Image: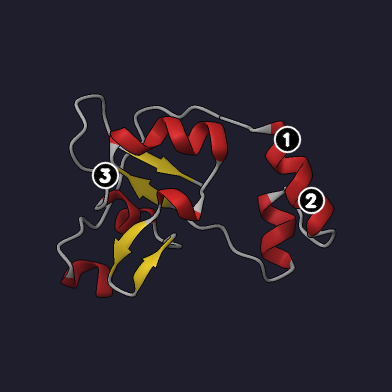
Amino acid sequence: SRQDSVGASTSLTVESAVMVVNADRLRSYLAASPAADTSPVRAHRKGDGLLFHGCPEAAVANIQSDGLRMRFASSGMLGRGLYGAPDPRKSYSYCRGSRHGAFVFL
């Protein structure tokens, strides 16, 4: 598979998860996108998908407080932008330089 070609493992084990919700951002998003659905199952049935965003530990506090913002974006393969992947293993490969585990947002 494509993931194997970039050196990703064939499996990923989640050791712990924390739900972080920025209520103001969520309300703002839902107001701007009335067709959006916060239920992953219903969103998938509508054809929407969930993306995983992996990042170094230094970026976590900004993402938790402000969400994904272009002003914090770095340059990637396609230029400066915010990147996500449907496969968490790909996003995991961007979790570097952390002494406290890997940080992947959904």
Residue 8 at what x, y percent from top left? Answer: 20, 59
Q: Give the mark toward the camera: 1 or 2.
A: 1
Label 1 with label 2: CB-CB less than 8 Å? no
Reply above or below: 12 against 87.
above
Q: Which residue is mark 3?
A: 95
Assign a secondary structure to mark 1.
helix
Depth check: give the residue in front, 66 or 52.
Answer: 66
Per the image, label 2 sits on a secondary structure element best described as helix
Q: Residue at x 26, y 30 (%)?
A: 101
x, y percent for residue 37: 76, 54
Please indicate, yes or no, whether residue 68 appears anywhere in the rendered image: yes
Relative to residue 29, is residue 100 drawn left or right? left
How far apart, in angstroms, are the residues tagged by discs 3 and 2? 29 Å
Q: Position of residue 97 (x, y in %)?
A: 18, 37
Label 2 CA crowd tier, 10 Å (few <14, some 14–19, many 20+):
few
C-alpha distance separating marks 1 and 3: 27 Å
Kind of residue at disc 1: Asp
- On the image, numbered disc 2 is attached to which residue? 30
Residue type marked 2: Leu
| Earlier residue among tags 3 and 2 | 2
Residue beneath label 1, please? 24
Mark 1 residue crowding within 10 angstroms, few (<14) / some (14–19) / many (20+): few
